């Protein structure tokens, strides 16, 4: 699938999902408002019935309609000398009849100045048998009876309504699950896509890298085959040397690819033995020394660790160190200046390899240890490589229960830090 096609699918599918989610949201709010209306209705009918009964008891006319002051706050304007315990009893009875078993608070207020005369919290369910709740009695009723209003509050109204929308939670949950699966699938597809692209780059790169020595060997052997007698001994040696070195290069390259394949199949067999990392560092530095000399660069060793003995596979660790030094040299435009430092740390031995080369932008750093990854440089690839070095380093460090981290700034050089348990 082409990148464009994937993008179109991604956008369309995301749009469809957004539409679906919005529809669900609209339905959810609608369902909520329907449930809320039903709740309000039940409370209002119950309160009307309470008011009517209270007022008829006092020989008064019908009550005023129930007012809803806030979403969960209902007021019955009675303006009558009612008895709080009777209010409580009637509320109990009427709410119960309408299946409203939620906790509520009610208050009896003086209708003239709105002061609370009596208040009580009634807990949810089985109220008939229940604890009495905490009542506050502000004023004893003395002398001429005052005129009261009754207010009822349902503190848990929203929770109750949400609880009644069970079906909606299941369907929303299912929808979210679909979104999650979709996101995961897309993530996987994009990852696969990226890997395929990297692999294609790698194959192009590899073909190119193999072609150069093959061509060189071909040309040299052609000359040797056709006119060996006309060649001077020096030129003969030069051609032989060329064939030999190009063949070595070819072999090394094939070896690296094979090594990667072995690692991929999980067959990396480590031969662990006590290894002196300092000696290893000195040896690998010597291996890059000729290349550094050629570019008039220099390498400084600062080996401060007191415990440099680790239990490791010396060949693989040496390869990993070489890979880092190779990068430090390759990715320096001016004369390479490399510093190697070791230090004791809590987790073991720390090795830091620092260069002053081109550096790596922050945004690319998280991909560095991915197989085949090379920092994109447009179409110019003046530094050759397969993007295998760092993924190898990472694999080797993992196999030794070590760590590798990178710090870098564009044009500010790079520092790779390895930590190996001693
Ligand atoms: N010291 C460094 N300075 C700047 N960039 C670096 C450095 N080390 C690695 N990189 C970037 O990280 C990429 C991945 O490095 P890695 O060693 O895995 O591959 P490579 O050097 O391109 O190829 P290979 O090591 O397989 O020959 C490189 O292509 C380069 O862009
Ligand atoms: Mg490399």
Image: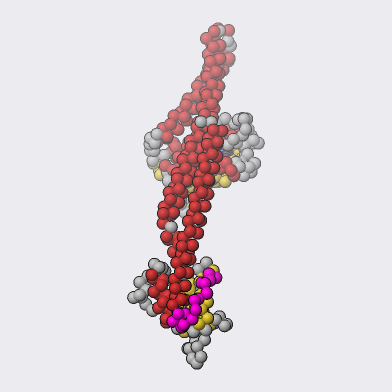
Q: Is 232 left or right of 27, judged from the image as shown?
A: right
Q: Please tell me which residue is depicted at 42% across the width and 46% down the height of the picture.
A: 401
Color encoding of the figure: secondary structure
Looking at the picture, how far across and down is residue 33, in whole percent? Answer: 50, 59
- Is 64 part of what is drawn in magenta? yes
Whether residue 320 appears in this view of the structure is: no
Using the image as rendered, state which of residue 18 and residue 398 is in the foreground. Answer: 18
Q: Is residue 127 visible?
A: yes
- Residue 231 lies left or right of residue 141; in this view the side is right
Which residue is most to the bottom? Answer: 143
What is the span of residues highlighted in magenta in the rendered image?
A: 54-69
Viewer-proximal residue, 136 or 184?
136
Q: Does 406 lie within the magenta span?
A: no
Residue furthest left as drawn: 129
Q: Residue at x 50, y 68 (%)?
A: 72
Residue 62 horizontal/vertical position (percent): 49, 76
Percent x, y of residue 373? 53, 36
Quarter-of-image position of residue 84: bottom left
Residue at 55% in and 36% down? 7
Q: Is residue 253 above or below residue 422?
A: above
Reply above or below: 335 against 207: below
Quadrant of residue 332 in the image? top right
Of 84 and 286, the residue lying toward us: 84
The residue located at (50%, 88%) in the rendering is: 145
Count every numbered label the image shows and give the total: 0
Identify whether 236 is placed above or below 280. Answer: above
Relative image position of residue 131 (x, y in whole percent) = 37, 77
């Amino acid at each position: 699938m082409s990148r464009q096609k994937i993008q179109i699918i991604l956008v369309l599918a995301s749009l469809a999902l957004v539409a679906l989610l919005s529809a669900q949201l609209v339905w959810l709010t609608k369902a909520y408002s329907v449930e809320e209306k039903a709740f309000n209705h039940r409370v209002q009918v119950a309160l009307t019935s309470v008011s009517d009964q209270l007022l008829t008891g006092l020989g008064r006319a019908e009550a005023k309609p129930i007012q809803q002051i806030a979403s969960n706050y209902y007021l019955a304007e009675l303006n009558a000398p009612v008895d709080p315990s009777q209010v409580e009893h009637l509320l109990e009875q009427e709410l119960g009849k309408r299946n409203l078993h939620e906790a509520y608070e009610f208050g009896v207020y003086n209708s003239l100045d709105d002061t609370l005369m009596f208040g009580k919290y009634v807990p949810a369910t089985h109220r008939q048998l229940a604890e009495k709740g905490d009542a506050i009695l502000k004023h004893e009723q003395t002398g001429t009876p005052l005129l009261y209003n009754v207010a009822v509050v349902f503190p848990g109204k929203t929770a109750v309504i949400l609880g009644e929308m069970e079906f909606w939670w299941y369907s929303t949950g299912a929808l979210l699950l679909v979104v999650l699966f979709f996101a995961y699938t897309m993530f996987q597809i994009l990852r696969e896509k990226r890997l395929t692209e990297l692999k294609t780059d790698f194959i192009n790169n590899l073909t190119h890298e193999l072609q150069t020595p093959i061509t060189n060997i071909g040309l040299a052997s052609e000359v040797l085959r056709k006119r060996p007698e006309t060649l001077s001994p020096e030129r003969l040696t030069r051609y032989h040397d060329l064939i030999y070195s190009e063949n070595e290069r070819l072999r090394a390259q094939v070896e690296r690819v094979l090594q990667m394949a072995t690692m991929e199949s999980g067959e990396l067999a480590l031969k662990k033995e006590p290894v002196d990392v300092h000696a290893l560092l000195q040896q690998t530095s010597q291996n890059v020394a000729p290349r550094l000399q050629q570019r008039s660069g220099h390498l400084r060793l600062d080996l401060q660790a007191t415990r440099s003995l680790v239990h490791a596979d010396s060949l693989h660790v040496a390869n990993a160190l070489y890979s880092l030094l190779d990068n430090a040299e390759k990715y320096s435009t001016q004369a390479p200046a490399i510093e190697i430092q070791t230090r004791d740390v809590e987790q073991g031995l720390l090795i830091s390899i620092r260069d002053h080369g081109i550096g790596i932008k922050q945004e690319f750093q998280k991909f560095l240890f991915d197989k085949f990854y090379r920092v994109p440089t447009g179409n110019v690839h003046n530094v050759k490589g397969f993007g295998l070095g760092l993924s190898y380093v990472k694999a080797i460090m993992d196999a030794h229960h070590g760590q590798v981290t990178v710090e870098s700034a564009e044009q500010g050089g790079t520092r790779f830090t390895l930590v190996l348990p001693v």
